[in-house]
Amino acid sequence: MKKLVAYITTGFPSLEFTVDAALALAEAGVDTLELGMPFSDPVADGPVIEAANLKALQNGFKLDHLFEASAKIAPHIDTLWMGYFNPFYHRGMENFIAKAKEVDVNGFIIPDLPLEEARPYKPMVEAAGLSLIDFIAPTDTEARIKEIVTDAKKFIYLVAYAGITGAGKSEDLQPIITSIKKYSNTPVYVGFGVDQNTAKDKAVGVDGVIVGSAFVKVLLDESLSDSQKITKISAIAREIKDKINS
């Protein structure tokens, strides 16, 4: 059974909504939830997630809100915090590790923390029984892939194309998937540009998909009520889960 990872932006449109949406996604078959930490300069994210980040910050998002929501979500679904390194650096990785353990969060996805800069932190994270997810890009050489994936835990995040999330580009990932699997038995999940239309094709040769913008677009749709948004993202999750496993 291939896995579905879903990203939503914490605190958008509200903290209560985040909790309700997360639990609904769990019921809809989502295996792992990425709780996005709103940040003013989300460099890996496209305009959809960037807009949600900005709105969450305008609504007064604080890191304590992330911890508060996670305490209600993480006992019910495998949860990771997805955020940029700035907050981890300023508050301290030790503090994030302690908070994650306290609320049952299982690890971190930090897209602007490359392998070399992650080295001081990864042993700390793993010693606490948590995961720091590794990224592979289509531009990585085979030597680089081997270096990154040899010690990868939980899953490897394969970026579907060079660029930002939600751009919907397409590249032949099979050669890079073959390279990854040569050096690691860790599951490979593909992200960037995955939605209801692309999920089946993107899932070929990998163990799961990561979907963000397709869900966040719904959260940004002001013509929908909160309950309609939750119904719609749940339907999207079910459709994607079905397609990647059919």
Image (tube, rainbow, N blue to C red):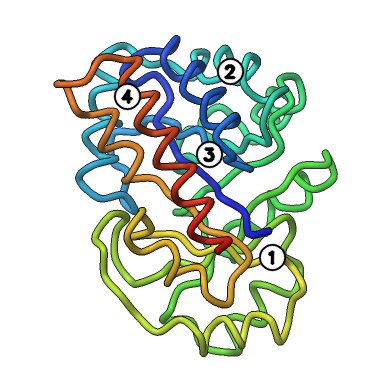
Q: Which residue is mark 3?
A: 34
Closest to the camera, between mark 4 and mark 2, is 4
Q: What numbered label is drawn on residue 67?
A: 2
Front one among 114 and 182: 182
Front one among 71 and 239: 239
Amino acid on which disc 4 is placed: Lys
Front one among 201 and 215: 201
Q: Residue 127 occupies which quadrant of the picture?
A: top right
Q: Which residue is mark 1?
A: 187
| Alpha carbons under labels 4 and 3: distance apart | 18 Å
Q: Secondary structure at mark 1?
A: loop
Mark positioned earlier in the residue sequence (2 or 3): 3
Marks 4 and 2 close (CB-CB < 8 Å): no
Amino acid on which disc 1 is placed: Pro
Q: Secondary structure at mark 4?
A: helix
- From the viewer's perspective, is 84 left or right of 56? right
Is 65 drawn above or below residue 83 in the view shown?
above
Marks 2 and 1 close (CB-CB < 8 Å): no
How many numbered marks are there?
4
Amino acid on which disc 3 is placed: Glu
